[in-house]
Amino acid sequence: MEFYLYIIITAYLIVIAFGYILDFLNLSHIKKHGTSIPPEFEGHIDQELLKRTVQYNIEHIRLDLISSVFNNILFLIFILYLLDIYNTWIMSLEYSFIISGLIFFLLLTYAETVVSIPFNLYSQFKIENKYGFNTMTFKLWISDTIKSLLITTILLGILITVGLYIIQKSPEWWWLWVWGFFFAFTIFIMYISPYVIEPLFHKFSPIDDKSLEEKIRTLMEKIGIRVSRIFRVDASRRTRHTNAYFTGIGKVKRIVLYDTLLESMSPEEILTVLAHEAGHWKKKHLLKYIILTETIALLILFISFHLLKTDILTDIFNISRDSLFAKIVILGFIGSIVSFPLSPLFHSISRRHEIDADRFSCEITGNKEALINALVKLSKDNLSNLHPHPLYALFHYSHPPVVERIKNIRSF
């Protein structure tokens, strides 16, 4: 079995090494081209802002590299040496199957949260603060972290409890019932999140500009979307970054606009951004994505069912006490290796959807210049990387790089 272990660990090291190569390519590409203003941004940014953008992205890339190296080393130590000790300890408690599973996975979740805290703090209060994005107090950060951990505990606790209960009651068909429950639970969370979870972190209020509200409603009616409410969210309590999004499933939507976005964009630009988001709904991108991911999830659960029935995973990793929980951790580890080469495929689908939504926005508003101006402002306001390496973008970008995106819009 040691031979298979060497193969798995070697594959993992190859994957993370390739990821670091992509990071270094992206870093060198930014440094090499960071002083040139793309034609699409001429007249909109100067050398000083471009230099600031490059520095901001370089600092985040370096932090991500350090965080990734640290986490990968820690995870390898855990999966190779500590998983057996941890699993043996959980099994020695001799709690019920479900209680043991809850303790096993929740403790791992808490450990992961603790490990990420120093990097999150540095990102928020060092880098984001340095470049004028952070508006969050340390007290608010602590409050958000505690709330997030409580919500994670509740939601993950429900998933683990019900999932393990299904496995107990239906040993041969649990893969199907677990898939169905997880799918239903995901849709349920998408419904309740705008009303239960999001208000725990943000204050939502009607937008003040009634003229803009009327224009938005008119545009959405033209598209075929019924808007229940149009909200302004107090994003500026935490960040100066800008954004806008839709919530809700079906034809009834809630539109949420960052207060920072309302301050920086004209009504025409806001309308093109919302038309882009509406384009995703009109083109059924979310539905297609759900069908694709749920089909893959069902296939993964079916394969997992057959692997988990055997002891091959625990034998390869020298787990002394047989445990479904340890097998699931190992399976997730192997799954991360297998899924990495597929990331360009999923990101290419996402990028194609973004192009379709841009085209829809231009067609429905008849104002592609406003959409271009909105993208330029979003890039400036968020200090977005204007010079990503093409190979890095292939593996990591769910949206086309902004310069390429603007070129596409001009060609419509």
Image (cartoon, rainbow, N blue to C red):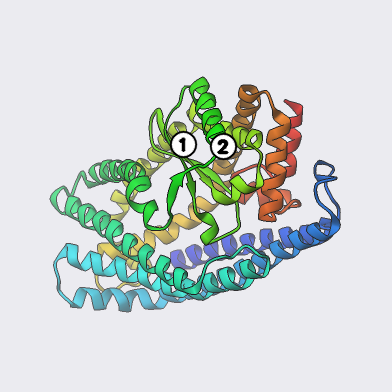
Estimate the spatial distance between the alpha carbons at disc 1 and disc 2, rounded to whole Å: 9 Å
In the foreground, 153 or 109 = 153
Pinpoint residue 181: horizontal percent, then vertical percent.
Answer: 25, 44
Q: Tag 1's secondary structure? A: helix
Rendered view: 239 above or below 351: below
Residue type highlighted by circle 2: Ile
Pinpoint residue 182: horizontal percent, then vertical percent.
Answer: 30, 46
Residue found at x 52% / y 62%: 238
The crowding category of the residue bearing disc 2, from other C-alpha atoms within 10 Å (few below 14, some 14 to 19, many at least 20), is some
Asked whether residue 79 appears in the rendered view, the answer is no
Q: Which residue is mark 1?
A: 289
Snapshot quadrant of residue 151 = bottom left
Q: Tag 2's secondary structure? A: helix
Rendered view: 223 above or below 148: above
Q: Which residue is mark 2?
A: 349
Q: Considering only order in the chain, which callout, 2 or 1, is on the residue closer to the N terminus?
A: 1
Residue found at x 83% / y 60%: 48
Pinpoint residue 282: horizontal percent, then vertical percent.
Answer: 50, 26
Residue found at x 76% / y 62%: 52
The crowding category of the residue bearing disc 1, from other C-alpha atoms within 10 Å (few below 14, some 14 to 19, many at least 20), is some
Pinpoint residue 280: horizontal percent, then vertical percent.
Answer: 52, 32
In the foreground, 168 or 30 = 30
Judge left or right: residue 396 versus residue 178: right
